[in-house]
Amino acid sequence: ERGRRTPEGILDFYRSTQSWVFDLLWFAYLQAEGYEFPASVVAAQYLRDRHVPPGAHLDFGSGVGVTSQLFAALGYETHLGDVSTSLLDFTRFRLDRRGQFPTYLDLAAHDLEADRYDVVTAIDTLAHVPDVPEAARRLYTTLRPGGWLFANVDVRAPGPASAWHLHSDAGRVALELQRVGFRRRGVLDGL
């Protein structure tokens, strides 16, 4: 109901919306059952196939923490970063109950440390970022030299049912990633 045409309005939307918890958990279930593309699993398997040792991992736009849980189980030191404090609070509740205690980062309130992470996942996240050039710069800076970024962009035509999808051209988002220095090491279907 509130305006989402400004960066402030979008941030307010993500920081106050709680119903996304159910949608994100449902989507994780659909991935686990083979009805949706399991992007997190594909990213992890890609690294394992190339014998990339576990290191520091940032889950940029972590949602309910599904990707972070997977990377932690594979031996990564994982940090969950999101602008949605309601999602971070829920995820903390969910993971604390399982005896998992990763680091949580409110991306609206904290800068990312330079040269901190070996792997960054931005899965189903960049479509919701109003300032892609700034996000690309932050992601590039936080990766260690030789680090890996796994990202996809779920683009959709503008409309009432896709108001939270801010970009309708994945190529423009990819161009912004390339402008800051990212280069493709390979293209995975769906990621």
Image (spheres, rainbow, N blue to C red):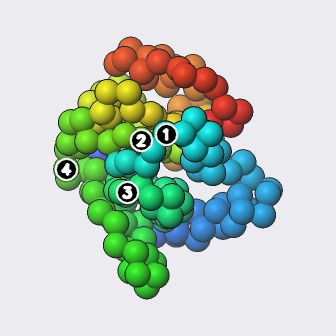
Under tag 2, what secondary structure?
strand
Quarter of the rendering containing residue 28 = bottom right
Residue beneath label 4, please?
110
- Disc 4 and disc 3 in contact, CB within 8 angstroms: no
Which circle's residue, 4 or 3, is located before the other in the chain? 3
Label 4 amino acid?
Answer: His
Label 1 amino acid?
Answer: Val
Under tag 3, what secondary structure?
strand
Label 2 amino acid?
Answer: Val
Instruction: State whether residue 97 is above or below residue 177.
Output: below
C-alpha distance separating marks 3 and 2: 9 Å
Give the x, y percent position of residue 172: 51, 19
C-alpha distance separating marks 1 and 4: 28 Å
Frontmost of labels 1 and 4 is 1
Which circle's residue, 3 or 2, is located before the other in the chain? 3
Residue beneath label 3, please?
78
Is residue 70 toward the left or the right of residue 101 in the image?
right
Residue 169 appears in view = no
Is residue 141 toward the left or the right of residue 149 in the image?
left
Of residues 1 and 13, the one nearer the viewer is 13
Which circle's residue, 1 or 4, is located before the other in the chain? 1
Give the x, y percent position of residue 155: 61, 34
Mark number for residue 119?
A: 2
Label 3 amino acid?
Answer: Thr
Instruction: State whether residue 153 is above or below residue 108.
Output: above
Under tag 1, what secondary structure?
loop
C-alpha distance separating marks 3 and 1: 15 Å
Which circle's residue, 2 or 1, is located before the other in the chain? 1
C-alpha distance separating marks 2 and 1: 10 Å
Residue at 62 percent of width and 45 percent of height: 45
Frontmost of labels 3 and 1 is 1
Residue at 71 percent of width and 58 percent of height: 31
